[in-house]
Amino acid sequence: MTFEFLQNYWWILIALLGGLLVALMFVQGANVQLLNNRLDDTQKRMVLNATGRKWELTFTTLVTFGGAFFASFPLFYSTSFGGAYWVWMLLLVTFVFQAVSYEFYAKKGNLLGMKSFRIALKANGILAPFLVGTAVGTFFTGSGFTVDKAAIANPSSPIISTWASPWHGLEALGQWHAVLLGLTLVFLAVILGALYVLHVVDEHAVRKEMRRTLQIAVIPFLLLFAAWFIVLMLRDGYTVDSDGTVSMESYKYLQNLLEQPVVMAMFAAGVLLLLTGLYLGIFTKRRRGFWFAAPGAILVVMGVFFLAGFHDTPYYPSNIDLQSSLTIRNSSSSYFTLLVMFWVSMLIPFVVAYIAYAWRAMDKWKITRHEIEKTENKY
Amino acid sequence: METVFWSRLQFAMTAAYHWLFVPLTLGLALIMAIMETLYVVKGDDFWKKTAKFWMKVFAINFAVGIATGLILEFEFGTNWSNYSWFVGDMFGAPLAIEGILAFFMEATFFAVMFFGWHKVSKRFHLASTWLTGIGATISAYWILVANGWMQNPVGTTFNPDTVRSEMASAQAFWEVVTNPVAVSKFFHSVTSGWVTGGVFVVAVSGWYLLKKRETEFARKSMLVGAVVGLVGSAAVMLSGDSSGVHAAEFQPMKLAAAEGLEDGGPRAAFTIVPGIKIPGMLSILATHDIDGFVPGINDILNGYVDKDGNTIPSVAEKMERGRQALDALTVYREFRESNPDSAAVAKAILDENVQYMGYGHLEKPEDVIPPVGIVFWAFRGMIGLGMLMALLLLLAFIFAWKDRLENKKWFFIAALVCIPLVYICGQCGWIVAEVGRQPWTIQGLLPVNVAISSLSAGAVKTTFFLFLAIFALFLAIEIRILVRAIGKGPQITED
């Protein structure tokens, strides 16, 4: 196995984990339904219990996504996390509140009252996909940082990665192209959430409301995604030559798409699956749209990561010092670390298999009003 | 330096807070799995209700542990940027493996355990309960592999081209995974979790007996808790012994600080409290030989000959050689493309001194001394309270086994007092481990002052106080909810 193969392999796994994270953000998207006043309180609890059985998978995927990025591309971890400090901290805080909200919100003695924890879940529902989407958006717009590995030998300023903006990541909110992707993800999460609730909750009124949500969310989602994608195809991009020099190139990402047929096929298949899921949810009585839309989301997100990182492209470009940009080659772990983790990753199918088994066993039983009103062990 | 201080404080607070929740998770996981096994084996509904009650307690405690784990993972990147690059190649892998192998297992089977009572078969449910605990334990293993590597960085070489410590070979990973420090830390930490779980269950059960409620439930829970806690106590003592030997071997300054030992030597005495010493005992504990040489703080500062006859240079000399290594690194990187000959000379100097490169970042030799008072008293707190917990668990076992729980009000009150004490005991242990290795993030390789991110002290202060507020709030809520859940009780009407 060559070093390049392992670097590519790990970029594919990062892309897969990113795709899984976005698909599993149906939890966040469904929790946005807590804002929906057409649902009564029991119906909102049905939604909460639908996501309450899955939130830990989303959370764990976030942790693993972070851990895998740290392990395989540590220079990204050190540069982006240490630099875009406030973005990551904000994301962290919303997830921390989400993690405790399920367990705390309905319990007596929770100090803040039920309402506050529901606000936390709603905030996480909107902010988490928005922040993750915007952060991934900067893979194309670039961020203002410098990397100087020799700095560590300099006693007066030994920090390798430095961030130019005093806003430490919040300045990305001024990058409208990145923000477009953040907003796209919010609507995608809402769509996936509605499709999931449609799938697992057995209550006519809730299903009807989910279909209505799909009808409302589909237009902004498609418009935002199309706008982001078209701008991406037209914009100048970052490219890296064989000796590692980074420069700007017109229509770089359009070229990446056209010259990587696999990525084009992934985008096409992903979008088709997403549209199929939406069609089933909006125009038919069938409840399995989630199982089309979620794999569709995974494929599209993987395609986005492939556009960002493959085909001689720096996936985390610096817009103030091009040569500081991070590529799959210059930011990865060493050969042996990637090799060891390659072998460990062979266990992933086993992990997926037991998750699928447990998921099926649990989701065989749909969530009903009776369960929420009459039984214990619920959120 | 202010950023270093606040970054350390923030990480210390997060780690300490995380460790308030993890030990109970580890201990209760085992206890409730044993109870559910009894239910499945005996078919007695009593054990089902008993297990379900402790699962409810487990669930309340579980969420905050997960949440704070994510904060720790993020903080490596957000606040320790240089660290993340410098050792990400070594340190990231265990974190990623922890996610893949352990977290998914915990998350998946926790949901089955909590919601699956009427959805999956009895045996699948039992397997899920065990797998939740096994997942938590595997998770502990990998994070302690990462922590153990920080204490004893094995299997790594410095690469001047990438400016980081890298995995030396595929076999080196095996060295990292079987690092003796990691292995004994794993057993020490996990089994201390069993002690925490045991003491918690004994104390809560004692409270029911004090109130003359749920007596059968309380007696049997106390028995299971005491057995798990006692096994944990024995294992903690054994692994504590090997931890001491490892500290002597790999982190002699930590041991010297924990003992307040200024000048060491052979037949070194163990200080119980200032003024009361056992002659020769420290040498026995640290080297398993009464004549074994144990260096004191001054020996380490000034240089000494260790128990195997190796000459250990003074800190000043290590600093000098570390600076030579850093200078050589700068020269090497400057000339590696333009002037290969000069680069080769610099590389030779670097290779000769690289093992002390971390010392090149220190300002003065005394920087290698951790805060002795804190480490010294934390060490005594850990051992003293640990022995007290073992005694409590032994008494609980005898009383519950012999069914002599009548009129033991004093014991039930003592057990309740032990709830905060067992947490203080665990915190003391981590203070010894982590404060004791200051100033190093990676022992000998990277001190805290060059491991941080390029952030203002104000930014880190802001997040510190934000987390402080969140943690205080969550702790208050958790305790209130726990107290209410315990007050409500398992509602088993066998009395």
Image (cartoon, grey):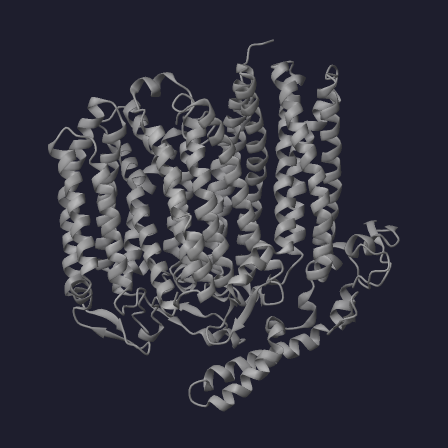
Q: Is residue B228 visible?
A: yes
Q: Nearer the viewer, residue B462 or A16?
A: A16
* Residue B154 percent coordinates (x, y): 60, 63
Quadrant occupied by the N terminus of chain B: bottom right
On screen, residue A299 versus residue B471, left or right, reads left
Q: Is residue B203 visible?
A: no
On screen, residue B127 versus residue A303, left or right, reads right
On screen, residue B173 versus residue A324, left or right, reads right
* Residue B323 percent coordinates (x, y): 60, 79
Instruction: Find residue A263 and report its image quarter.
Output: bottom left
* Residue A272 percent coordinates (x, y): 15, 46
Residue sitting at 31 percent across and 38 percent down?
A: A27
* Residue B147 percent coordinates (x, y): 57, 54
Q: Residue furthest left?
A: A283
Residue sitting at 67 percent across and 33 percent down?
A: B229
**Is residue B433 shown above or below B401?**
below
**Is residue A13 shown above or below A5?**
above
Residue sitting at 47 percent across and 51 percent down?
A: B97
Q: Nearer the viewer, residue B422 or B143?
A: B143
Residue sitting at 52 percent across and 66 percent down?
A: B169
